[in-house]
Amino acid sequence: MPKEVVLDLPKLTVYGSNQATVENYGGIIEYDEAHVRLKTNVKVISISGKNLELKTITDVDVLVEGDIDKIEYE
Amino acid sequence: MFLVRLANFIYGYVVIIIEGMFPERFLNICARRGIYLWNVKKEGKYQISANISVRGFKMVRPVAKKSRCRVILKKRRGLPFYVFRHRKRKAFALGAVVFVLLLFVMTRFIWVVDISGNVEVETSRIEKVLQEAGLKAGVPSMGVDVWHIQNTVMTRLDKISWIGINIKGTTAYVEVRERISKPEIFPKDLPCDIVASRSGVIESIDAVSGQRLVSIGDVVSGGQLLISGAIDSKAGEGVRYVHAEGEVMATTWHEITVEIPYREEIRTRTGKSKSKHMLKFFNFYVNFFINDRISYENYDRISYVKRLSIGKNLVLPFSFHYDNYYEVEVTWRQRDINEALELAGQEAFEHVKGIQIKNSKRELIGEKLKVTYECLENIALKKAVIREDAKDNGKDIRGGDN
């Protein structure tokens, strides 16, 4: 069974350095061109970089596109 | 991804600006309520732009109120809005409809008949037979009875041993194979003589059946009887006729006279050129030139055709024809004597190809070169025997119960 379903954990998929998908997130805390902070069940995922865009937003996932420098858990 | 974008375009979407202190809250509520947002981008300090479907946009008002944001509609995009904006342009709509219809109709006809595989039978001849059988440019591809056409061509053109017709899109590919004609064989059960096919000196005679009439060293002339099919029986029973068979090798002389190509034509382009363009649709030509006279004395014409097609097989009945005329200056170059003789020799040799050559002699006669080839070849040629008893009753020459 997939962990993100059983344990209700966020799942982060990163392609190169310009696309990241966060599945099973709780909500958007902050969004601007340099930072995207997403609430999850465990910690806050903070993505920082340049020209960040939210390519799609649904109730289960967020697709962040742009020049990603850092992905942190806060 | 492309499919999603296409669907968005077809259903239509709007670009909105969300203005407020906490636009993130707006995004969260939208996500929770199942309002799909994409291409979310920060525009200013308190502004975010986003794409939203038309259906979602209608549900956005309470969300905006709850998140204390202002939603401004910036752009309408997609097919429904596009059609709405151009709803009064009737000719445009008509054009679009006509375009689709025309495309649909035109791809249902055959516009090109492509014939390949023929070497000796001219393409135009096959084309003509195909046309009469019902395959030509302009016929609906559904109505082409391939079976019938193949049969018609096969029966009408003896030279063709196989034909295959493939219809792909608007092109009919016709592939043919030609029959290799069988050599003329003298029927084995009929009596015959062997005569000389040309004059020469006999080197060897190998008579399998029949009566030898000449011997080694004899000089024979063309048509002379070499091996007779009529055998005189010694017992006095009369003449017996057989199918004479054998090989007669003889030294023969082939005299070939060819012109010596002292001069060579050289065509050089002067740099002047003219071109004619034509547009062809169906069977009509539209000329793109007024003065259609080519004033050059000598010219090379190079034409090419560009067909309008969708992909490789869906050729449409529109084509562009280019004719380029290049003025050329014709000069004659004097060839080196050895080079000219070499060329003439090669030409002469073409005539005796396949024959064993023993010797050759070259002679210059005026402007011409005479080459005499001394060859060794089989001069046996079968010829129907004329029977004396057949002569008596006047007709039956070929009957052979003897």
Image: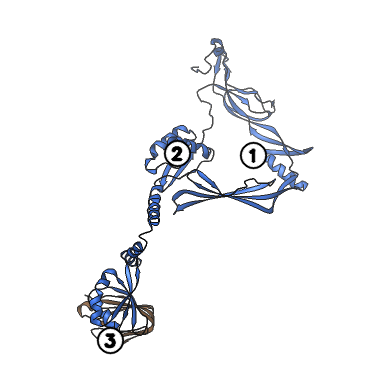
Q: Which chain is blue?
A: B
Residue B391 image-quadrant placement: top right
Q: CA distance from mark 2 to mark 3?
A: 77 Å
Q: CA distance from mark 2 to mark 1?
A: 31 Å
Q: Residue furthest right?
A: B366
Q: Residues within 10 Å of mark 1 (few under 14, many from 20)?
A: few
Residue B381 or B323: which is nearer the viewer? B323
Q: Residue B368, how many percent across, how many down?
A: 76, 38
* Front tag of 2 and 1: 2
Q: Residue furthest left?
A: A6
- Mark 1 lies on residue: B353
Residues tagged 2 and 1 counted as in contact (Cβ below 8 A)? no
In the image, which disc is placed on residue B162? 2
- Mark 3 lies on residue: A44
Chain A colour? brown
Q: Is residue B305 above or below residue B357?
A: below
Q: What amino acid is labelled 2 in the image?
A: Trp
Please determine if labels 2 and 1 lie on a single subunit: yes
Please determine if labels 2 and 3 lie on a single subunit: no
